Amino acid sequence: MRTLFVLILCMSFGHTAFAAGGDYSSGSGSSSNTMDQPQNPFDKAYALIDSKKFAEAHQELKKIVAFDKSDNTYNLLGFTARKSGDLVSAGKYYEKALSINSRHVGALQYQGELFITLGELDNAKQNLEKIGKICWLFACEEETLLKTAIDEALDS
C-alpha cells in the first residue's frame, strides 16, 4: 500500500532535491549565463563539491550565506566544513540549519555522520530515529545512508 501511494504521489508531483550531491541545477538545462537568466549563486560551490574541493566550496558558500541564511545553506556549510576536516565548525553549521528547520533530513543525516566521526554513536542513532519519524510514510535516502554509516561503524 505504501509503495502504491508513493508511486501515485511521485507521478502527480515533481521533486527537486537540495543537498550535497543532489539535483542542484538552475533548471535551465544550460550552463550559460545570459541577461535573461542570472547564474545560480550555488553553481560554483556545487561544481567545487563535485570536484571534491570542499575547502574551496566552503569559502564560496560563506559568500552566499551573507544573503541566503537558509537551512540549506547552513547544511551545505556544515557538509563542506566536515569534508574539509573542520569538525567544530561543521557541528555549529548543522545546529544552525536544524535551529531553522528541525525536520531537515539532510542536516540530520550529515550531523549523524559527524557524530559517527566523533565516536558519538548514540547521538547518530538519535538522528536516525528523528529521520525515521519524519520519513515514516516515504522512504528517505538520508535514512538509508545514515543507517548504513552507523552499521559500518558498529562493524568496525
Image (cartoon, helix red, strand yellow):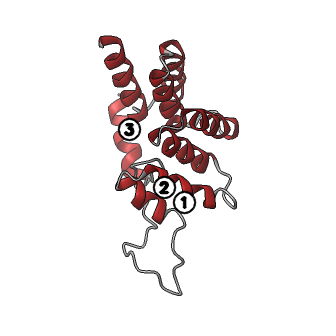
The residue drawn where x is 37% and y is 30% is 145
Image quadrant where one finds the N terminus: top left
Q: Residues within 10 Å of mark 2 (few under 14, many from 20)?
A: many
Res 152 → quadrant: top left
User: Could you tell me residue 94's position as x and y percent?
Assistant: 60, 36
User: Could you tell me residue 28's position as x and y percent?
Assistant: 42, 73
User: Could you tell me residue 146's position as x and y percent?
Assistant: 41, 27
| Mark 2 lies on residue | 57
Secondary structure state at the residue bearing disc 1: helix
Q: Quote the CA–CA distance across marks 3 and 2.
A: 34 Å
Circles 3 and 2, Cβ within 8 Å, touching? The answer is no
Q: Amino acid at mark 3?
A: Val
Q: Amino acid at mark 1?
A: Glu
Q: Quote the CA–CA distance across marks 1 and 2.
A: 5 Å
Figure disc tally: 3
| Mark 3 lies on residue | 6
Q: Nearer the viewer, mark 3 or mark 1?
A: 1
In the picture, the disc for residue 128 is none
| Mark 1 lies on residue | 60
The residue drawn where x is 48% and y is 56% is 56
Secondary structure state at the residue bearing disc 3: helix
Circles 1 and 2, Cβ within 8 Å, touching? The answer is yes
Relative placement, left or right, of 79 versus 153 is right
Relative placement, left or right, of 26 versus 103 is left
Vertical comparison of 152 with 64: above or below? above
The residue drawn where x is 39% and y is 75% is 31
Q: Amino acid at mark 2?
A: Ala
Secondary structure state at the residue bearing disc 2: helix
